[in-house]
Amino acid sequence: MAVNIVPVGADHKLLDRFLKLPFDVYGDDPHVVFPLLGEQKKFFSRQHNPFFDHAGTELWLAMRDGRAVGRIAACVDATSNAHHHEQVGFFGFYEVFDDAEAAEALLRTAADWIAARGMDTMRGPGCFTSNHDCYGLQVAGRFDRPMIGMPYNPRYYEKHFADFGLAGAKDLFAWWMETGGVMPAKMQEMIDRVLERPGLVIRPFDMKHFLAEASLVRELYNRCWSENWGFIPLSDAEFAYMAKDMKSMVDADFMLVAELEGQPVGFALTIPDFNQATQPLRGRLLPFGWLKFLLGKRKILSARCILMGVLPEHRKLGIDMGLVYKTMQSAFAKGITHGECSWILADNRAMNRILEGYGAECYKTYRVYEKKLA
């Protein structure tokens, strides 16, 4: 039977099939972590998620003989295009069986939708943009359970993208670190000099004033990252939406702010790897998932540093080195034995050198693809 591409639109039954398709694609793969279905439905709610205030999106299912065999989404984000002065549409939420016909039809549908909105470039995969989870396609390294917020995919997706004419636009690195290791003497001397710098303080979040602290980090993030590839500024509404969810996930000792002479100049944000606790739930918190999650949460041994930045005018002072060190100390004190720093742009030589100096291993590579559209 031929493949038929069906838009999801506002059909709740089709959205349900869209969200549940990964269960069929991955089956009993021991490494996959299915997203919580309730959280996914909340993400796609145009009434609740302020991302849709500035982004147009569409979802599709690939159907063959009445059975869903693949899915894809496309997005045009006005904020991203205005910031970077480009005409790019994103594709993502890509899941499909190893079916060349379905893959080509899905990618072609997304490309045509993006082009019809005046865009000249198709970029992805993502869910939807670099401000969201699961950005990029893993192409190298350990194909084991991903850390929270990171993608996991079958190897054959690379061929699907290549066959469609998508080419690599940017590689992203994930670094693996052991928290209890002994620093090389030279590295420790450098860290000590940084931390002894007069006027430098690296402190944890004040959770009693969480929103003010989070707002401070948002300001630092926008200033630190504004020139970075893939950066998209967050609106006030998006920031509030993300901060509300983040508060229940963070530990104050994992949220660090660097101050120099009393002025904030950098930050680091690390979260426990909740994937370790949610993986056994297979996407469902009810009826007994909550109990499993709470029990599993106590046994989490890993964490992911998801954001770090230092203001451009202070980047040659080693403050980023101090943030990494303090993060590792906090993690070790909390019983975290290992962690991941991700994602780091492959061409961010300064940060990659720092992590290498700490003895970290670049253990996974993700790729963002692009295709020029006629």
Image: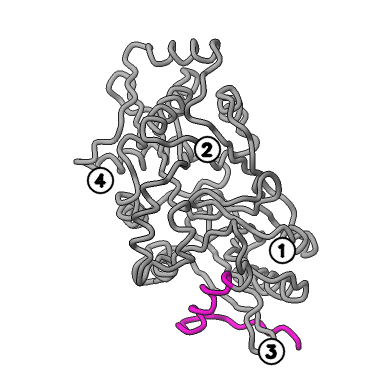
Task: Name the residue type under label 1.
Answer: Leu
Task: Name the residue type under label 2.
Answer: Cys
Q: Which residue, given by chain and number where applicable, does mark 2 sit on?
A: 341
Q: Nearer the viewer, mark 4 or mark 3?
A: 3
User: Does residue 259 appear to the left or right of 374 in the view shown?
Assistant: left
SS label for mark 1: loop
Give residue 166's position: percent from left, percent from top: 74, 58
Q: Nearer the viewer, mark 2 or mark 4?
A: 2
Q: Nearer the viewer, mark 3 or mark 1?
A: 3
Magenta range: 1-23
User: Does residue 96 appear to the left or right of 148 in the view shown?
Assistant: right
Q: Nearer the viewer, mark 1 or mark 4?
A: 4
Tell me which residue sits at (64%, 43%) in the image. Answer: 364
Give residue 104's position: percent from left, percent from top: 74, 72
Q: Which residue, given by chain and number where applicable, does mark 3 sit on?
A: 65
| Residue 211: mark in rendering | 4
Q: Would you say residue 40 sits in the magenta stretch?
A: no
Q: Which quadrant: the C terminus? A: bottom right
SS label for mark 2: strand
Calculate the distance from the C-alpha at mark 4 to the C-alpha at mark 3: 51 Å
| Residue 262: mark in rendering | none
Tell me which residue sits at (44%, 10%) in the image. Answer: 193
Please tell me which of labels 3 and 2 falls first in the chain.
Answer: 3
Q: Is residue 31 above or below residue 309?
A: below
Tell me which residue sits at (46%, 16%) in the image. Answer: 191
User: Does residue 243 appear to the left or right of 336 in the view shown?
Assistant: left
